[in-house]
Amino acid sequence: MSDTEDPHHVPASSQRISEWVAERILERIARGELVPGERLPGERQLAEQLHVSRVSVRAALQKLKTQGFLTAVQGGGTRVVSSAGAMDGALTEMVRVKHGNLCDLVEIRQALESWAARRATERASQEQIDHIGRVLAAMGETGRDGKQAADDMDFHLAVAQAAGSPVYLHLLATIRDILGQMMEYHHTEPFALGKEALMIDHHRAIYEAIKRRDADAAASAAADHLGWVLDRYNDLSRKAEDLSHPGAEHTP
């Protein structure tokens, strides 16, 4: 996010100023500088950045809350919301009760994350690539029991941010809860039994391809990883069915 905005374009009237401030905040959201779930700077900081009064900032924030772009944070402050709403919970339930829906979601992720990995090779800054590398290194550290799922999620979010697409970030935000549950499951038995090193290798392949700016290899590595995840789900589902009555649905 830029520290300051050009003060010469600030309109004269107070009403127009608050509308102008709202437009500047929306531009930051559209550019991906403010992502779903991110907390906005405080009123004082925003006022300093935009060279306007705190009154104008407060009015702009209230307008954006009313329009559904922002929401109040408990204890004070404001954060960006996504279009998830009730869809998040509904999708989670759909995936939970039917294995076929889970497989659909993995296939959709496969397409989306392959695209994101490709875009990251084209748009990522060196700082963003270094950040992906640090997250990958954390995934491979010993003594991080219980944190692997968070590291896994951080890796995929880092690639998403490196892709430089606010639209993609909002899509991820829409399915954030079910993604979090999937990551948790991927690092528990029986899913990860003897497979942690292999999963880290999958992520390393994505990172190395992005690092060397090889778009085809990055997209392929992401597709291969999600393809393996899909095969793993199907394999575990078949084994679960063998241990239960025929026709039962089993999803994480």
Image: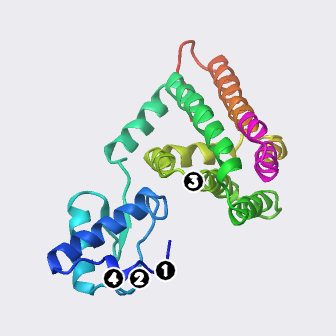
Judging depth in this view, the residue of 241 and 222 nearest the camera is 222
Residue 219 is one of the magenta-drawn residues? yes
**Which is more N-terminal, label 2 or label 4?**
4
Q: Could you tell me if the residues under marks 4 and 1 are in contact, i.e. CB atoms within 8 Å?
A: no
Tell me the residue that label 2 is attached to. Answer: 49
Q: Which residue is mark 1?
A: 3
The answer to whether 147 appears left or right of 43 in the picture is: right
Q: Is 98 rendered above or below residue 47?
A: above
Distance Cα–Cα, label 3 vs label 1: 19 Å
* Residue 76 visible within the image: no
Location of residue 17 in the rendering, given as x and y in whole percent from the top left corner: 22, 76
Of 187 and 140, the residue lying toward us: 140
Q: Secondary structure at mark 4?
A: helix
- Which residue is identified by label 3? 164
Q: Residues within 10 Å of mark 4 (few under 14, many from 20)?
A: some
Residue 240 horizontal side relative to residue 177, left or right: right
Distance in Å between CA atoms under marks 4 and 3:
26 Å
The residue shown at (50%, 75%) is 2
Rendered-image quadrant of the C terminus: top right
**What amino acid is found at the position of numbered circle 3 in the picture?**
Gly
